[in-house]
Amino acid sequence: METTDFAKYLSTFLTKYLAGERNYSQNTILAYKDTFVQFITFMKEQKNTEVQKLTLECITREIVINFLDWIQENRHCSNATRNYRLAALRSFFSFLQYENPERMYEWQKILTIKVKKHEKKSINYLTTDGIKLLLEQPDLSTRGGYRNLTMLALMYDSGARVQEIIDLTPSSIRLDNPGIIKLFGKGRKARIVPLQQEQTVFLKEYMQKNHLLETHANQYPLFSNSRKEKLTRAGVTYILKTYADLARKINPAIIPETISCHSLRHSKAMHLLQAGVNLVYIRDLLGHVSVQTTDVYARADSRQKREAFEKAYVDINPAGTNTKSWEKNNNLLDWLKSLEK
């Protein structure tokens, strides 16, 4: 069977371009692949075009828009999911501008498709009391409970993404004072994260109990299942939710109904911000490319907003003899001016 140009370019895009030239993670590549599986399904079911007959000439701006509408109407995808599918398609057609310039005008028309606005969810994080309660739930008398506590505590302390924790090996950790771990984030970008001394001591005990300090274990998963395989994202999520459910029964006021592994990352960032840590340092800890991404935590911190208002408050009680004009209140003026920046 003759290979179509669509099949040829898509294979190169997924297997060589994303991994080799863009250094995308395996998870991102799999997510992009899912987009094209859905697109091929759409072309077959809605446009009567079998995959073996699907060529680049079949694809137009209108076809792509029809596909995006289809996943929302038939698969009930949100605007956010639609935008993610569009991002995958955009990446492919940007790639085609150089690989297939004969149809560059059509590719550029596709690249003009706009994302849809969607409501951004508020940041879901736990208070310090909530984190403490959560970490009190694992049963340390069992091997699994000890592993789970070590993993969740490290996830919070380092602000790591769940995949970064899953991919950790003993070789990624330095236990000498000061302790550090090396995390590989999006695009396989590495970053060094310092560890609190208490965390280092606890982590060392865990590694000793599981023989992970021996040289031959350097590349073993730091956190593994009963078959010595590294945990899955679903597995880590299940562990977290199990303990969250137990903690919620004790004090439902401080454990959100909805909690995810990313909630621990959000919690660490919020607690650092509330402690007065500069956003630039929080950005480096989380592995964000831009401080603008990290700025979402400053916007979400209602306590800091309240304190800013309280500092800027002026007593306007007419009965007071010491009432000052707002024009003479430097704190308020500085705060108002900061809103213009």
Image (cartoon, rainbow, N blue to C red):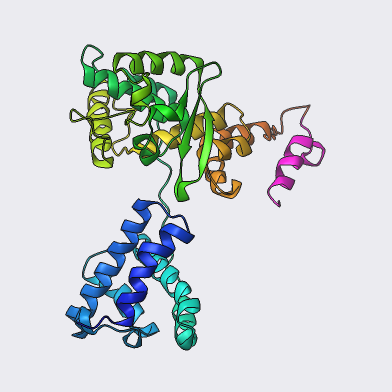
Residue 107 coordinates in the image, percent (x, y):
45, 81
Please name the predominant secondary structure of the magenta segment in the image. Answer: helix
**Drawn side of residue 318 relative to residue 257, left or right:** right
Residue 135: quarter of image? top left
Above or below, 274 relative to 145: below
Question: Quick check: is 157 in the magenta stretch?
Answer: no
**Which residues fall within the magenta stretch?**
323-341
Question: Quick check: is 324 in the magenta stretch?
Answer: yes
**Quadrant into which the N terminus falls:** bottom left
Residue 189 coordinates in the image, percent (x, y):
50, 45
Residue displayed at 32% across by 34% down: 256
Residue displayed at 28% across by 27% down: 252
Total marks placed: 0
Residue 118 visible to the viewer: no
Residue 264 coordinates in the image, percent (x, y):
40, 33
Residue 216 coordinates in the image, percent (x, y):
34, 24
Residue 33 visible to the viewer: yes
Give the residue furthest to the front. 216
**Drawn side of residue 69 relative to residue 323, left or right:** left
Q: Nearer the viewer, residue 291 or 323?
A: 291
Above or below, 30 relative to 93: above
Q: Nearer the viewer, residue 133 or 44?
A: 44
**Drawn side of residue 27 relative to residue 192, left or right:** left
Above or below, 100 relative to 203: below
**Drawn side of residue 228 relative to residue 168, left or right:** left
